[in-house]
Image: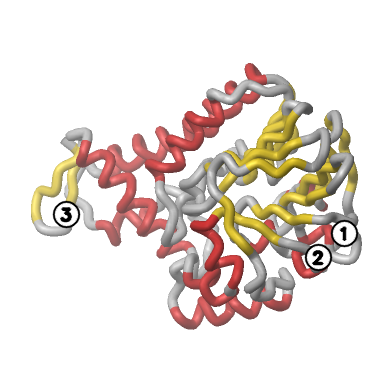
């Protein structure tokens, strides 16, 4: 059963609302930012249901269920990047973004409704990269970090020196770019952008919590990037003989063999296609015949 277990951690004037199980899915870590004039919440998680702190504004890093499960607690303005706006306004659009088979899409829609309390937010409005929210003595600046979703964003909070990086979460699972609107190329560019931002604290949406210091953050980010490199290496090794996309998806680059579910094949297929594309572009893989690929 979902729990509203919630703990608070303070980083300057930024309060991290740590979700149950250290913010592991289906939970997440939310952020509360108070200024002298206004207060905002970033990514109201499942743990905020029934325990949501007051706020004048809600910012959403991206339109995934674990980042908006507590949104129904707020009857205040809601903002998200314009490229994720349609998915936040409509649960149907959110589900479509997962690219699931029809029967699985129906079950996912029910799960989002019943377990994550996701409702249409037609009142939500968009923002763009660089938008600044002045709370009075404290600002929150949008840092567009696409790849996970097209509109995925981080938020730079000053003068505290706190960068919330959302689902660039540094977990050992690695970067996820398996949705319909995801992009490996954009994700890699976003990770490079994060690396260039030197602040005191970096907050993640899930288990890794808050990392202090640019050096430590970059070390962990390099390990996170390394997962992508290992997927490339795994694919190249598998392509020692010609393979189809279907065979690569079954071989798996993302999920371990024991993981099952209707999401696995579509995610693996989209991931395989993206890795194939980059390896073909760099001359490491070639299409030896229609629909069959081999390492050079």
Lateral position of residue 46 relative to residue 177, left or right: right
What label does residue 52 carry, if any?
A: 1
Residue 262 x/y as whole percent: 49, 70
* Disc assigned to residue 74: 2
- In space, the residues marked 3 and 2 are separated at their CA atoms by 51 Å
Of the image marks 3 and 2, the number of the one nearer the N terminus: 2
State the residue at coordinates (74%, 41%).
134
* Most foreground residue, 219 or 188: 188
Q: Point out residue 124 in the picture as x, y percentages from the top left corner.
A: 64, 65
Dot 2 alpha-carbon crowd within 10 angstroms: few under 14, some 14 to 19, many 20 or more = some
Residue contact at pointers 1 and 2, CB within 8 angstroms: yes
Examine the rendered structure and indicate whether residue 215 appears above or below residue 179: above
Report which residue position mark 3 lands on.
292
The residue mark sitting in front, 3 or 2, is 2
Residue at 79 percent of width and 35 percent of height: 138
- Foreground tag (1 vs 2): 2
Left or right, 153 with respect to 273, comes to: right
Left or right: residue 224 compared with residue 293? right
**Are dots 1 and 3 in contact, CB under 8 Å?**
no
In the image, residue 277 sits, relative to residue 221, either above or below, namely below
Query: What SS does tag 1 mark?
Result: loop
Residue 186, quarter of picture: top left
Crowd rating for badge 3 (residues with CA inside 10 Å; few <14, some 14–19, many 20+) = some
Q: Residue 223's x, y, as percent?
A: 54, 28
Give residue 184's position: percent from left, percent from top: 40, 44
Q: Which mark is residue 37?
A: none
Say which label, 1 or 3, has the lower sequence index.
Answer: 1
Disc 2 secondary structure class = loop
**Mark 1 crowdedness (10 Å alpha carbons): few <14, some 14-19, many ≥20:** some
């Amino acid at each position: 059963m979902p729990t509203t277990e919630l703990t608070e951690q303070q980083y300057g004037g930024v309060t991290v609302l740590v979700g149950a199980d250290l913010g592991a899915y289906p939970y997440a870590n939310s952020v509360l930012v108070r200024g002298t004039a206004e207060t905002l919440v970033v990514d109201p998680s499942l743990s905020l249901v029934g325990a949501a702190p007051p706020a004048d504004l809600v910012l959403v890093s991206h339109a995934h269920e674990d980042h908006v499960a507590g949104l129904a607690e707020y009857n205040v303005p809601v903002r998200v990047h314009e490229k994720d706006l349609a998915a936040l306004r409509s649960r149907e659009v959110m589900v479509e973004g997962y690219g699931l088979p029809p029967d699985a899409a129906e079950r996912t829609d029910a799960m989002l409704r019943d377990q994550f309390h996701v409702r249409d937010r037609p009142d939500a409005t968009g923002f763009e990269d660089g938008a600044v929210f002045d709370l009075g003595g404290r600002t929150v600046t949008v840092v567009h970090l696409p790849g996970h979703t097209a509109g995925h964003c981080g938020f730079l909070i000053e003068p505290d020196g706190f960068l919330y990086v959302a689902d660039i979460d540094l977990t050992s699972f690695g970067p996820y770019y398996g949705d319909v609107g995801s992009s490996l190329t954009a994700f890699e560019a976003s990770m490079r952008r994060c690396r260039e931002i030197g602040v005191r604290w970096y907050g993640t949406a899930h288990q890794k919590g808050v990392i202090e210091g640019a050096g430590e953050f970059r070390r962990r980010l390099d390990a996170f990037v390394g997962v992508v490199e290992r997927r490339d290496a795994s694919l190249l090794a598998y392509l020692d003989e010609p393979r189809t996309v279907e065979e690569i998806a079954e071989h798996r680059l993302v999920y371990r063999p024991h993981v099952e579910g209707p999401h696995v094949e579509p995610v693996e297929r989209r991931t395989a296609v993206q890795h194939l594309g980059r390896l073909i572009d760099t001359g490491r893989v070639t299409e030896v015949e229609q629909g069959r690929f081999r390492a050079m």
